[in-house]
């Protein structure tokens, strides 16, 4: 399955290293960037907790409880990091050097005259193997005339899985406790520039129903309308 491009590293060790780097930079830059002491203190507390629990999780005495605590601790740490970045790192006076010091890419502020996509994108579903569905993206019927190669640059896909026999809510794995009615109720989201995507589900998902929604983006975080939700049984 295609994954989102994200500024946050996927490995916990790298997330922890980034948090430590931020703390070092904020020692001298927090006041200039308007980062409150309370936010820096919270980041320090979460970083220390994550450092400690990761050592336990990687040790020989690891238990299911420690594994769960590690997951929850890093979820809290990365949530705080996302908040600080979105609240304090996306506006001046940060420079290219500042972003490099924070291990972040410089935000793209290039203006583009591209308009918002107007067509709708859906998909034809094929079965590629056990617990796998193949999406072939196509324009929704009746919207083909609205397609525009200049604006239709990428595709955002959302999906969820549901079983009426074992309803459960686990957004991290895409599981929902009720039949979704809106695209926003589909917890897994990624962006792709390809019109063919293989979605691989977990072992044990066979027989569940997968729900999908797709919309077109112009590459500048501007998106057209979602297509109607569509679904398929997971093989």
Image (cartoon, rainbow, N blue to C red):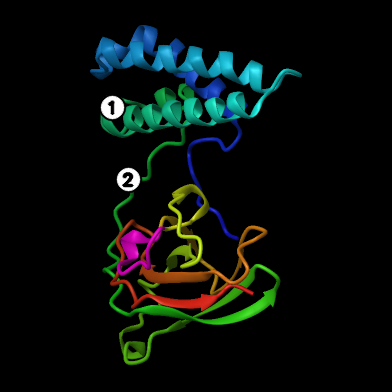
- The residue at the point 40 percent across, 28 percent down is 81
Q: What's the CA distance linking mark 1 and mark 2?
A: 16 Å
Q: Where are the magenta residues, as a range?
A: 177-186
Residue 14 location in percent, x, y? Answer: 59, 27
In the image, is 157 to the left or to the right of 41? right
**Left or right of residue 201: residue 137:** left
Q: How crowded is mark 2: few (under 14 residues within 10 Å), some or many (20 or more)?
A: few
Q: Mark 1 points at which residue?
A: 88
Q: Furthest-top residue in view?
A: 27
| Residue at the image point whose x is 32% and y is 31% from the top | 83
Is residue 179 part of the magenta span, yes or no?
Answer: yes
Count of picture labels = 2
Q: Where is residue 212 in the image (x, y as percent from the top left)?
A: 44, 70
Q: Which of marks 1 and 2 is nearer the N terminus?
A: 1
Horizontal side of residue 150 vs 92, given as left or right? right
Query: Which mark is on residue 109?
Result: 2
Identify the main secondary structure in magenta.
loop
Q: Which of 166 and 185 is in front in this view?
A: 166
Question: Circle 2 — which element?
Answer: loop
In-image side of 82 versus 91 (left or right): right
Counting from the top left corner in percent of width and height, residue 196 is at: 58, 74
């Amino acid at each position: 399955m295609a994954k989102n491009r994200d500024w946050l590293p996927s490995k916990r060790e790298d997330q922890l290293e980034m948090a430590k780097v931020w703390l070092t930079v904020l020692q001298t830059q927090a006041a200039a960037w308007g980062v409150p002491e309370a936010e820096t203190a919270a980041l320090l507390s979460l970083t220390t907790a994550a450092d400690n629990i990761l050592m336990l999780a990687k040790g020989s005495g690891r238990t299911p409880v420690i594994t769960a605590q590690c997951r929850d601790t890093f979820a809290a740490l990365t949530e705080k990091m996302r908040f600080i970045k979105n609240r304090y790192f996306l506006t001046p006076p940060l420079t290219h050097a500042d972003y490099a010091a924070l291990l972040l890419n410089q935000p793209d502020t290039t203006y583009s005259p591209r308009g918002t996509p107007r067509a709708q994108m859906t998909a034809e579903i094929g079965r590629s193997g056990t617990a796998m569905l193949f999406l072939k993206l196509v324009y929704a019927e009746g919207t083909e005339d609205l397609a525009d190669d200049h604006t239709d640059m990428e595709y955002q896909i959302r999906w969820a899985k549901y079983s009426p026999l074992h309803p459960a809510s686990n957004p991290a794995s895409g599981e929902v406790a009720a039949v979704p009615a809106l695209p926003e109720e589909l917890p897994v989201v990624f962006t792709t520039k390809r019109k063919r995507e293989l979605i691989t589900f977990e072992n044990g998902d066979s027989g569940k129903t997968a729900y999908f929604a797709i919309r077109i983006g112009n590459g500048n975080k501007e998106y057209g309308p979602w297509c109607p939700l569509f679904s398929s049984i997971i093989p």
